[in-house]
Image: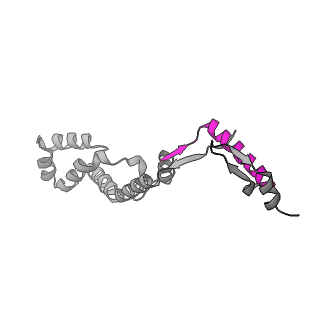
């Protein structure tokens, strides 16, 4: 079976998403540190903790009362925007598999049938190139290929 052949790679979108993910590293680290300070795993747990601890319905007031207002604001703004599976344990870098996964996401491949056809065509072209027929093959008006024996006789490699 043939290996998958790349048809198209959307490099501009890939580069933009990679840039954005790298920019979010510092934000992910801040969010992670805030979760650690609250000793919670997600924003909902933080909000429950704040209500239970202070009794205030307003989470910002609750966080302010605990001197953790900045941490809560960071969590409330960015928690849903960060996918922690993209970052290492301490959120100081992207995981090694992030970039290959992102490349795969922005890659389009030929179908298996098309790949087989492309491989066969390339094999035929390689065979034709062994005979030195490059200048003696042309395309007719209808798009079909034509072999010109005279050109081949004039331009073939001499041994």
Lateral position of residue 81 relative to residue 119, left or right: left
Residue furthest to the right in view is 159
Lateral position of residue 31 relative to residue 22, left or right: left
Q: Residue drawn at (30%, 51%), measured in percent from left and top?
A: 36
Q: Which residue is nearer to you in this view: 118 or 75?
A: 118
Q: How is the image coloured?
A: one colour
Q: Residue drawn at (31%, 56%), measured in percent from left and top?
A: 27
Q: Which residue is nearer to you in this view: 89 or 51?
A: 89
Picture quarter containing residue 130? bottom right
Q: Image quadrant for the C terminus?
A: bottom right
Query: Residue 119, percent across and down?
Result: 69, 44
Q: Is residue 118 magenta?
A: yes
Q: Image quadrant for the N terminus?
A: top right
Q: Is residue 124 magenta?
A: yes
Query: Residue 78, percent across and down?
Result: 27, 50
Query: Residue 53, percent across and down?
Result: 16, 43
Q: Residue drawn at (40%, 53%), measured in percent from left and top?
A: 17
Q: Which residue is nearer to you in this view: 50 or 77?
A: 77
Most common SS among magenta residues: helix
Lateral position of residue 149 relative to residue 141, left or right: right
Q: Residue drawn at (36%, 56%), measured in percent from left and top?
A: 20
Q: Which residue is nearer to you in this view: 52 or 126?
A: 126
- Which stretch appears magenta? 106-132
Picture quarter containing residue 145? top right
């Amino acid at each position: 079976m043939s290996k998958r052949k790349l048809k198209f790679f959307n490099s501009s979108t890939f580069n933009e998403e990679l840039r954005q993910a790298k920019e979010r590293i510092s934000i992910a680290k801040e969010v992670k540190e805030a979760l650690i300070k609250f000793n919670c795993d997600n924003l909902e747990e933080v909000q429950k903790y704040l209500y239970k601890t202070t009794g205030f319905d307003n989470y910002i007031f609750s966080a302010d009362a605990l001197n953790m207002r900045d941490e809560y604001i960071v969590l409330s703004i960015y928690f849903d925007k960060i996918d922690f599976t993209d970052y290492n344990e301490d959120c100081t870098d992207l995981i090694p598999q992030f970039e290959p996964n992102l490349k795969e996401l922005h890659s389009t491949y030929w179908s298996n049938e098309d790949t087989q056809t492309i491989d066969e065509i390339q094999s035929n072209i390689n065979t034709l190139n062994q005979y030195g027929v490059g200048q003696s093959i042309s395309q007719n008006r209808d798009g079909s290929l034509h072999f010109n024996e005279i050109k081949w006789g004039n331009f073939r490699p001499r041994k």
